[in-house]
Image (tube, rainbow, N blue to C red):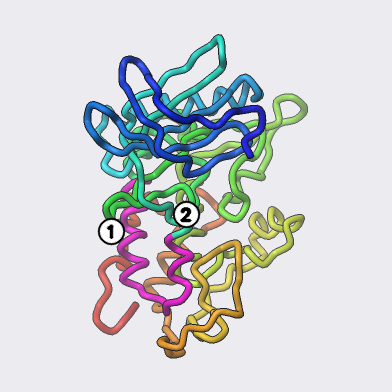
Amino acid sequence: MIKNKKILTGELRLNGDAYTILNMIGHGGSGAVYRVLHHKSKEIQALKHVATIHLSRQTTRDYRNEINFLYQLRKKRCAHIPLLYNYKYCRSSGDLSIVLELGEIDFASYLGMQKSKPLNMNFVRWYGQQMLEAIAEIHEEHVVHRDLKPANFILKEGSLKLIDFGISKKVDRHTGTVDIDTPTGTINYMPPEAFAFVGDGPKKHTQIGLPSDIWAFGCILYQMIYGRTPFHRIPSDQKAQHICSTSIKIDYPSVVHFNPTKNKQDGGEEEEDDDDTYPTQKPSHISIGKDTVAMLQSCLERSPLLRLSAKELLEHRFFYPSSSTL
């Protein structure tokens, strides 16, 4: 249940626009996301409703930060960013409402649905390209997302849209970085520099730039190919050390094995289900070509200075394979 917050039902008005709340489609400790009908357009949209009165000042700033970035990116007509239709923040009650374009499914769920199928590199390229296009759009505006992961992409009529800009930051146009006091994000997708503190005492911080998103994208691409992120199997208390250490090599297996009776090639990151069987599928062994490995390595360089940009990656040979290679 949602703590300290009643579930919304019935009709709602925001800045003069009327909505009918249809059902809740997700919730967290401080709020929920609803499917709503916008009366004027007759469109089904998404309403994120948050009770910020129960949150820390920083978390409240993160939610308002998301609105600012969505508004700026909407003005730039970014194709892979969901449309921001309406928003309202009530200081007296602390209620924050954001109305957005509604996706059909998040990419983490969609990726999990692929676990019953052998690796399809056309699938990987198609969605990998769209992710990079989304990243290129926000990087063009000097915005680093900082929490790229499958769950933060949604599918809308076959097109990927990037969501959840709560901890996103603008990088300095001259240095290309922004100072961060505390590492934040989802550790399986966080880059080495997120744990590399500089300074002492109260001035201790990390420096994050646009390449941080490229590392996260590399982790997602790795997951789409191998069924897990590069450091998924490392114990939680050792992940940061493994992510940062240049002496620990990232493994790039040359073959992906798919066994439908054991479900070895699993598109999901959080669960492994070895009991399901798929009698219509046959075991397969997919070779991973050198261009695919080179693409991954271009993203998963420990040094952010060595990672290719989103625009450079979109020109990579990985997206233009010959008939004889993956």
Q: Which element carries disc 2, helix, strand or loop?
A: helix
Magenta span: predominant SS is helix
Amino acid tagged 2: Pro
Q: Is residue 105 depicted above or below 100 in this figure? A: below
Q: Work out whether residue 132 can be spotted.
A: no
Q: Is residue 276 depicted above or below 39 in this figure? A: below
Using the numbered discs, state the Cα–Cα distance from disc 2 to disc 1 in whole angstroms: 22 Å
**Circle 1 sits on which residue?**
315
Q: What residue is rendered at 46% in x and 89% in y?
A: 283
Q: Position of residue 89 (x, y in %)?
A: 47, 17
Q: What residue is rendered at 49% in x and 31% in y?
A: 169
Q: Are marks 2 and 1 in contact (CB under 8 Å)?
A: no
Amino acid tagged 1: Glu
Q: Position of residue 82 (x, y in %)?
A: 33, 39
Q: Quadrant of residue 280?
A: bottom left
Specify the label residue 4 is tagged with.
none
Q: What residue is rendered at 42% in x and 86% in y?
A: 281
User: Does residue 97 appear left or right of residue 207 in this picture?
Assistant: left
Look at discs 2 and 1 and give the one toward the viewer. Answer: 2
Q: Earlier in the sequence, mark 2 or mark 1?
A: 2
Specify the label residue 150 is tagged with.
2
Q: Is residue 134 magenta?
A: yes
Q: Work out whether residue 8 can be spotted.
A: yes
Front-most of residues 63 and 21: 21
Give the magenta part as a residue range: 110-135
Determine the residue located farthest toward the left in the rendered image.
41
